[in-house]
Amino acid sequence: MTTMAVTLPLPPVVSATPSSITLTNLDEAKPKTTAKDSSSPTGYFKNCKTMNELRQIHCNITKKGICHSPSSVTKLIAACAEMGSSESLHYARKAFECYNGDGGTTGLLFMYNSLIRGYSSAGFGGDAILLYIEMVVAGIVPDKFTFPFLLSACTKVVGFFEGSQAHGAVFKMGLEEDVFIGNSLVHFYAECGKIDYARKVFDGMLERNVVSWTSLICGYARRNCPEEAVYLFFEMVETGVRPNSVTMVCVISACAKLKDLELGEKVSAYMGEAGVKLNTLLVNALVDMYMKCGAIDSAKRLFNECVDRNLVLCNTIMSNYVRQGLVREALSVFGEMLQQGPRPDRVTMLSAFSACAHLGDILFGKQCHGYILRNGLEGWDNISNAMIDMYMKCGKQEMAHRVFDCMSKKTVVSWNSLIAGLIRNGKVESAWEIFKDMPDSDLVSWNTMVSALVQESMFVEAIELFRVMQNEGIIADRVTMVGIASACGYLGALDLAKWILTYIEKNDIHCDMRLGTALVDMFARCGDPQSAMQIFNKMVRRDVSAWTAAIGAMAMEGNGEQAIDLFNEMLGQEVKPDEVVFVALLTACSHGRSVDQGRHLFRSMTEIHGIPPQIVHYGCMVDLLSRAGLLEEALDLIKSMPMEPNDVIWGSLLAACRNHKNVQVAAYAAERITKLASERTGIHVLLSNIYASAGKWTEVAKVRLQLKEKGVHKVPGSSSTEVNGIIHEFTSGDESHSENTQIALMLQEINYRLRDAGHVPDLSNVMLDVDEKEKEYLLSRHSEKLAIAFGLISTGQGMPIRVVKNLRMCTDCHSFSKLVSRIYEREIVIRDNNRFHFFRQGYCSCCDYW
């Protein structure tokens, strides 16, 4: 039933504040039947179990001519209300409407109270409220028994407006001190999500019983205020009020939300002191608490010791097993249920499908599908969604599509499950087509597609999709912004990064640890380590990933010393390092020429932190040693590796051979790479360049002939720069840009001014056997030079120029950038495929070491 915004014609209505009651204390407000009542014919009404029995007694008293007496009608209505079925309530209403006797207002009030109570208890809250309105319009004044039933009805339909008016009537009639009404108000406000109102009523109660405390404790626990729930429980115990089983269930559930095992066990100890007997509800709450707190063995023992396991308990332990990744244990419980009972329901099957999906067990998944069909559960959309997810994770896309197509009611979740499954199976284009065909989409749909585009390295497309979201008025959340921050970081678009941070602050998006880490990484990749560290320093909580992002920011800047300081600070805060943070640290050492520090860190992985180095760590060390010219030591390290070195490690050695002009080791490394990854054209190009640097043009020709025979081509140098929110991309030798004429003129001016400053082009960077004039022209058309020239003509005086390049900067472009930064008084930031270069006043942050 939907919430009814009706105005209750209560006796002078006064707007007031909060309170409520659980169903248990409604019985306390019931009129009592004395032993004397059962001796009369009408007294038998209360003993009726079925409507047939009640009708027979009603016929009997009708024959005796006493069916219209106030007492008979009152007891008939009370009996029907007690049964609480649609049929019995309809019968009671008919009897009430047929009654035309004069029982006075007291008799009518009792009848109305019985009807309101019956409708409310049966879940027909709206009908109960309408009966109350009818009663007041008829001039019948409600009493203290009316309001607990009425507030219960308002609670069931979440009728905050109606319940507030009822509260006003209570206040007007001076009934606010009644403990049962107070309990009902606490419960009502808590269930409507107005926990502050509930607390206000509670604090104003002169008399409180266990129901009062329990209602507020449960309200706090259900409204994600577990700390307040536990605190209130201990306050209740201190006042001498003994908790009941309902209290214990609520407070144990609060401990489960806090995931505080020690607190949960402390709370549980009060059960024995309070004499609360262990029932299935309490066992269920305890099992859930132990599971969520990671005490798996305690939960399992309690579950195994429970002799009367019900369906709720089995579902609780199954869902928690799945959540903890213990999927085989979940399926074991499922198997026991099939053999011994209780019979699995749709909640059980959701856990079973999740377990099958996690294991990739398509056979068992199909058996579960069969159970669904045999038991008629396929009509539930969440079951179909779980099956789609299971089949997708098992790689059975056709089956997932069949389940989807058979659904009579496809919800947004159904579409999202299909899209997520296709993305997981690498079918991004198919997912995109389905996304466009969705009749309705929600934020999850958009987030799924944004994340997919980022994972596929389609960063520009991800940003464009985010802009479409904005145009359609969809407010992003933390998940959206994590994906967008990652895309922006890879693009190196600082203006966009600043806009993203402003968007997050403007829309009050909670910056949790994951989003904070993404923002740190974004600014670091965009060449703004200062902003990255500002965000890092503002983070309240930092895990090892956050520290790694900050250390990575220092590594990109080449600030190895600061990276080490951050690592030591992290250890000081007792954050345990992982494998990834050592990658960032060794990279920082490599960029900062800290060979000894790098050796120390590498050894400390096993000796101090118990982390065995992986192949990526060996790769970092080979890069560190090779850059420093220690090629023999790097080669010895490769030969001592406990695992087979991959092409990336040999590639690091090969790249260093070019800088240190070691043709012999280069040829050896290239031979190894060819055996491991013959398709990597970059390696052959690098070897060709090494031969060219040494003037061995015959060897150059051989390598390039091999590339030609394989039908592969060198990846051209590409650079991009962001101007006014638009990313402009340039390729070496490219003349297709709309501003090409102005760019060429600017380059000509730059070259004149650089020549006057004494700059001589380093023609060794042109790995072609052509004359020097041609080499000089080719060198002048490198992609980063085109991007810098465009930046100079497109941005204001003194504005930084930021460039992202797909390859390593050559030495000539490096010298070019240093001089341009001094002559034109511009800060130039270039991110190549290895690190950041910050050019200021003729100097680079890398100190010519890259």
Image: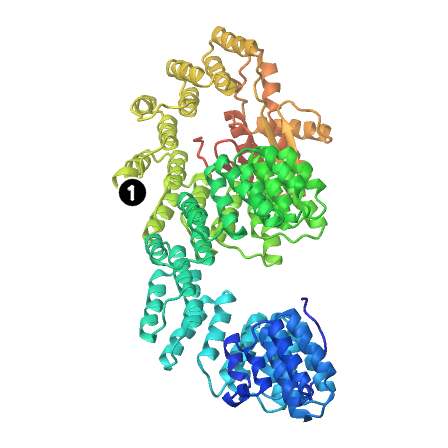
Q: Using the rendered image of the protein, determine whether residue 802 is visible from the camera's viewpoint.
A: no
Residue 774: percent from left, percent from top = 61, 15
Residue drawn at the location 67% of the way across and 78% of the way down: 92
Q: What residue is shown at x 39% (from left), y 77% (from top)? A: 235
Crowd around label 1: few <14 · some 14–19 · many ≥20 (10 Å):
few
Seen in the picture, residue 678 relative to 172 is either above or below; the reply is above
Which quadrant of the rendered structure holds the N terminus?
A: bottom right
Residue 93 visible within the image:
yes
Place residue 122 in its image quadrant.
Answer: bottom right
Residue type at the position of mark 1: His
Q: Nearer the viewer, residue 248 or 108?
A: 108
| Residue for point 56% across, 31% down | 805
Figure check: 336 above or below 636: below
Residue 363 place in picture, x, y as percent = 49, 35
Residue 50 in picture, x, y percent from top left? 59, 71
- Residue 450 vs residue 601: left or right? right
Q: Quadrant of residue 195?
A: bottom right
Identify the residue position indicated by label 1 in the image.
609
Which percent across, then down, holds residue 231? 41, 72
What element does badge 1 sit on? Answer: loop
| Image: 397 above or below 305 | above
